[in-house]
Image (cartoon, rainbow, N blue to C red):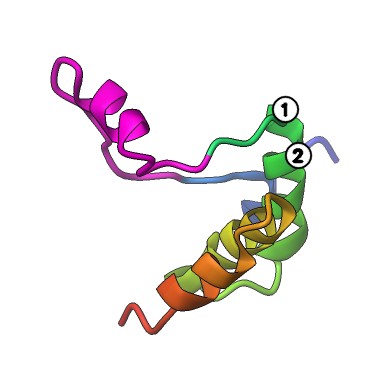
Amino acid sequence: EGKAKPDDFWLFAGYAGWGPQQLAGELDRKSWYMAATDSQTLLKELARQSKDADPLDAGLDVWELLMNMIGRGETAEECSGDFD
């Protein structure tokens, strides 16, 4: 019909910002895990999981999957928990 359905939309809310040199410092301290990929990898995985995802946990499964893919599964397990 050419009409959009609620499932056709994504809504992201939030803010992330860094002061001068803050991100560089976090990278130097290994506060971030770097992985080479393209934007479609993440978006396709989020879309695949979105139909069954609990909005309170949205994205956590993707984060755990990506952490496993870069060899950081143990870290993901240690950091996972109840965010309620």
Q: Residue furthest front?
A: 29
* x and y percentages locating residue 7 in the rendered image: 67, 54
Magenta range? 12-33
Q: Which part of the image, by quadrant, shows the N terminus?
A: top right
Q: What residue is drawn where x is 45% and y is 76%?
A: 78
Q: What residue is drawn where x is 26% and y is 37%?
A: 15
Horizontal side of residue 31 vs 64, given as left or right: left
Q: Quadrant of residue 24?
A: top left
Q: What residue is drawn where x is 48% and y is 71%?
A: 57
Name the one closer to the observer, 26 or 80: 26
Q: Are marks 1 and 2 in contact (CB under 8 Å)?
A: yes
Name the one closer to the observer, 6 or 37: 37
Q: Quadrant of residue 38?
A: top right
Horizontal side of residue 29 vs 2, given as left or right: left
What residue sits right under mark 2 in the picture?
A: 41
Q: Residue furthest left?
A: 19
Q: Which part of the image, by quadrant, shows the C terminus?
A: bottom left
Amino acid on which disc 1 is placed = Asp
Give yes or no for residue 19 being in the magenta stretch: yes
Q: What residue is drawn where x is 33% and y is 30%?
A: 28
Local SS, label 2: helix
Residue 72 disc label: none
Judge whether 61 appears above or below 70 on screen.
below
Amino acid on which disc 2 is placed = Thr
Callout 2: few (<14), some (14-19), or many (20+) C-alpha neighbours within 10 Å? few
Residue 38 disc label: 1
* x and y percentages locating residue 32 in the rendered image: 42, 41
Judge whether 19 appears above or below 75 on screen.
above
